[in-house]
Image: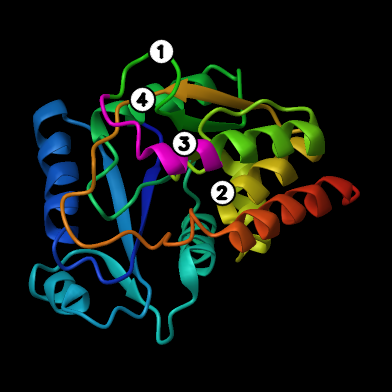
Amino acid sequence: MKKSKILLIIPAYNEEANILKTCNRILEYNKEHKTNYDFIVINDGSLDNTRKILEENKLPHINLIHNLGIGGAVQTGYKYALKYDYDFAIQFDGDGQHDVNYVEKLIKPIINDEADFTIGSRFIENISGFKTSFMRRVGIKIITFFIKIACGFKLKDTTSGFRAANKKIIKEFANYYPSEYPEPISTVLVVKKGYRVKEIGVNMYERDGGSSSIHSWKNFYYMINVCLSILIAGTRRSK
């Protein structure tokens, strides 16, 4: 694992309250555990001081001219991972929710050739103390049901952004990554293409500050759209 090239992709939009702490935790982990996790922050057109903080602290980052949303920001990270020939790419939120101590656990099934893509879950193995709000859990269960219908795969933490990919998935996502509802839709797409996907129990924290980019969990219109999008993704032919 120490010989592998590992990249943490950190999408960030208006994360001035969190981004420095998030990056410093990775740097401190590397120093303490003698690991070699690289990271790249994708500053998704932030309107606050995110860019200033990244530049003043000389943190590796890419500044997007316009806000592309989480899908576009993450795809930029996968393009970077493909260009620089990384063995593994891990999506890692800039809001402080993801625990760097679980990166190794997330990658291990891929190293052991048990999976091509892993998803960190708050809802298995009873590891995570933070489970998110009741309304979001209801929404997640609904999305779980539709993913099962669309591709036959049961995923408990459908919106988890803590995910690890091998080189095959890096190339897939660099070429195409959904801009709308990217986590559940991308999961359906990789399952439909025959890739091995595994859910891994991880710890997550409540965000340190700022506000989530997901504001529509109580919106019935949002739930209809995401569920229809999942079903449509499930009808696409694998290439």
Q: Residue at x 72, y 27 (%)?
A: 153
In this rendering, the answer to whether 90 lies above or below 131 is: below
Q: Secondary structure at mark 1?
A: loop
Q: CA distance from mark 4 to mark 2?
A: 17 Å
Q: Secondary structure at mark 3?
A: helix
Q: Return the x and y of residue 49 as percentages of the image width and height.
A: 16, 78
Q: Quadrant of residue 1?
A: top left
Q: For the residue marked with disc 4, what is the amino acid? A: Val
Query: From the viewer's perspective, is the residue at label 3 or at label 2 nearer?
Result: 3
Residue 125 is tagged as 1
Q: For the residue marked with disc 1, what is the amino acid? A: Glu
Q: CA distance from mark 4 to mark 3?
A: 17 Å
Q: CA distance from mark 2 to mark 1?
A: 21 Å
Q: Which residues are magenta?
A: 129-139
Direction from residue 229 to residue 126 in the image, left or right: left
Magenta highlight on residue 19: no
Residue 183 is tagged as 2
Q: For the residue marked with disc 2, what is the amino acid? A: Glu
Q: Which sits earlier in the primary sequence, circle 2 or circle 1?
A: 1
Q: CA distance from mark 3 to mark 1?
A: 17 Å
